[in-house]
Image (cartoon, rainbow, N blue to C red):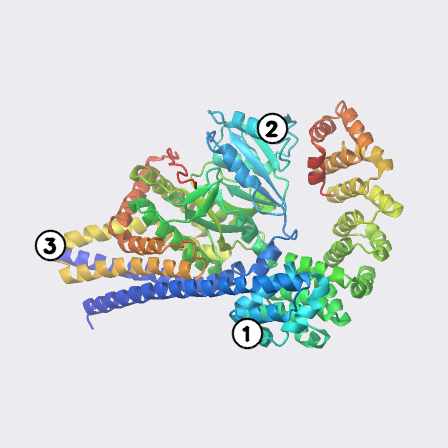
Amino acid sequence: MSLLLVLGVIAVAQVVFVVLLTAFVIVRRERFVRRAARVSAGHARLSAPLVQWLVGTSTVLRVVEALRDLPHDAALAFASELYDTRVPHQMRGSFGVAVREEPWAVWAIAGADSWRWWRRLDAARALGIVGTLADADLLRPLLEDSHSAVRLAATQALAAVDDPGLVRVAVLHYPVEALAVRLFTTNTLRTVWRLAETPLLTFLGSTDSSAADLAAWLSLAESLNLPSLRAAITALAVHESPEVRAAVARALRRYPHAESVEAARRMLLDSQDFVRAAAAQALGSLRALDTQGELVHGLTDCAWWVRFRCALSLALLGEPGRAALRLARQSPDRFARDMATMTSGLADGAVLELADV
Amino acid sequence: MMHALAQALSALDWAILVYFVALNSFYALLLLLSFPELWTHFQLADDEYFTRVLSSDALPPISVLVPAYNEEVSIAASVLSFLTLEYPRHEVVLVNDGSKDRTMETLVQAYDLYEVPPAIPRTIATANVRAVYRSRTHSKLLVLDKDNGGKADSLNAAINAARFPYVIACDADTLIEPDALLRLARPFLLGRDIAAIGGTIRVVNACKVAMGRVVEARVDSRWLPGCQTVEYLRAFLFGRLGWNRIGGNLVISGAFGLFARKYLLAIGGYETGNVTEDMDLAVRLHVYLREHHIQASMPFIPDPVAWTEVPASRTILHRQRERWHRGLIGTVWERRRMLFNPRYGAVGMVSLPFFAFGEMIAPLVEVIGYLGLVVGLMVGAVNEQFAVAFLAVAMGYGILLSVWAIVLEEVTFRRYNSRRDLWRLFFFALVEGLGYRQLTVYYRLHAFWKVMRGDRGWGVMQREGFAKPVK
């Protein structure tokens, strides 16, 4: 075959491709418009029964029927959104039971062992709505899925499934999870905190855990804010890893107690600047008025962030702290003077935002 | 003599054919690699459930860095659009780079600024910072007023002043979609260690804009902006996504890119002497990560969008493309030791060689090809039918790639809602190869001439402004 012929064949193939692709775009656009109209009409049909059910003048069955008219994926997406944003906690159980055998829910759950991650994501999402204790075995592999988005959706199902073993798995895996999965795990664990308390106490007290793991569990403890965890957190204030000590200082912000203040006060003398900065921040969050002297002294710290956190914490202490800041504007130390001048010019709202209490 | 010339032209034809096949095969490979990437991102971007997660406070705080020079007309609105971005925690660090107009006065008035001591670390050396301001009305805003030092210098000053671990570099005249920061932060949620993330830049020229937001995406009917709309789709929807899979994304757009501040500080921030600071920065980041054995990635994700105005006149387009190519030449030349160096992984073995031998010298090869073709036809060394067929295939290939980009846009993000705009995209995909392509080849060739002359200037980039407010 000559080169000319080859080029001719390629040119013809190109023309065919361009025509096919153009036709594909046109057909797809038309299909999209029709589907969007169908979904939009379905949403409109759902509106009245949904409101009536939410205010108690109708049963959930009319909502379920309206959802049935939507394409499976649209029904799942809409049900998921309803469940998260509009259905009150006390009505979620009845909603889950009502839709459990709906075709779209069955279709979604059937994808739990699919090789396509987005099908597993749908399954995890569906379990978040319709899951029960009987689904624990189905949920476990999704909690340990290779795709973060699937794990993230699976964590939400923890509350529905309410299984102590799965909660322990979630707490155990917490340190290695992506940020969002951690957040979702935290939110879910707040609702099943009774199941989370024991494993978290065990992990915080274990001596063979790595510093990174401990820091992650400390951040979980900070978010859960369970009084029973305070002693375990404070005990780690003298841990050899500065990463753990900083995590302790951050966690103590949520545990107002004399021992928390004492621990943060000690950490203000830490050798690592980021631990000192976190400790200064904690003292401000705890409104520890009797540590004003230490915070004023912190304005002369060699690290900018420590000076900054001390200044913000002083501003958080109310008028005595503000007065100390005004006084520090005349300080012989140039860095203390500059920091005090900068923060004393901030409005209360700005202090709160910058201090991140 | 004529026989020798004919032989030389024949050899040239073959060389150009091989170059053409190799280059376009690589583009085809990028296209194929972009499919799974695009599908993954589309699944997540389109997922309302995941979008709700993105609105949570799990995301790391971000500092938005905005260098401004002589922007008095638009600066107040621009800053407001940055302050009102949908993101749980962000601050805006604006740097007035010694503007000669009333940019600073406008800011002071609009945001009730007051001067504070310049208590910011000076990790990267920059031009003198004259004053630092905070706003009484917007605690998220920090303004630095400094001596003129250029965009890179301003960004460096902003990096010094930034409080948060991630920074996003934006142009003051770029419109960022309200949810773009949330979308840009998605890789953080998927647990990757991130050094930088690039987002998509789209053409704003004919779009309807209200309150600093694009409210209706449109395709410009004019030739130059229209062709650039298709060009941007092609570059972002499959070019950069394809590079994600190879692991050698070399361009994080300077107008819209997110960076881990610690890595920027480690490499000394932006290079002030480079005319395309974004590519230079991405290459230096890659080098730093490789040399320090850091496994952080630099992905591009397609759904966060920033809108920018593209040149509508040939003069401005000439300056822009010539400058871009000059920057490419400078970066490749400075990093020539990385070429085919396995120590730098995919960047040394694939990306940089592609940019050197595919992108950088492509205009030279194309012009030599045109000249060889003309001379060959004149002396009868080239078969006319072959020449026509070759040109048709070359153009057809360009059209096919552009149409693929439109298909990818249509099956995923579908920003252009009207059918008229869809047809316009197809039209510009068809005509882009007739004139526009040759024009940009000429501009890029001019860059070689300027490099030889040692020209390092930017040239003036005049803007038309966002002239289509919604009533």
Mark 3, Cα crowd under 10 Å, few <14 / some 14-19 / many 20+, is some
Q: Which mark is residue A115?
A: 1
The quadrant where residue A227 appears: bottom right
| Image-based side of B42 in relation to A279, left or right | left
Which residue is located at x 48 percent, y 35 percent?
Answer: B151
Read off the chain for label 2.
Answer: B
In this rendering, the answer to whether A312 lies above or below B279 is above
Q: Secondary structure at mark 1?
A: loop
Q: Which residue is mark 2?
A: B112
Residue reaching furthest to the front:
A57
* Residue at position x 53%, y 51% in the image: B197
Q: Is residue A256 left or right of residue B440?
A: right
Q: Is residue B258 visible?
A: yes
Q: Which residue is mark 3?
A: B379
A158 on left or right of B447: right
Q: Quadrant of residue B225?
A: top left
**Type of amino acid at the residue the image marks with label 1:** Trp
Chain under label 1? A
- Residue at 76% over, 67% down: A168
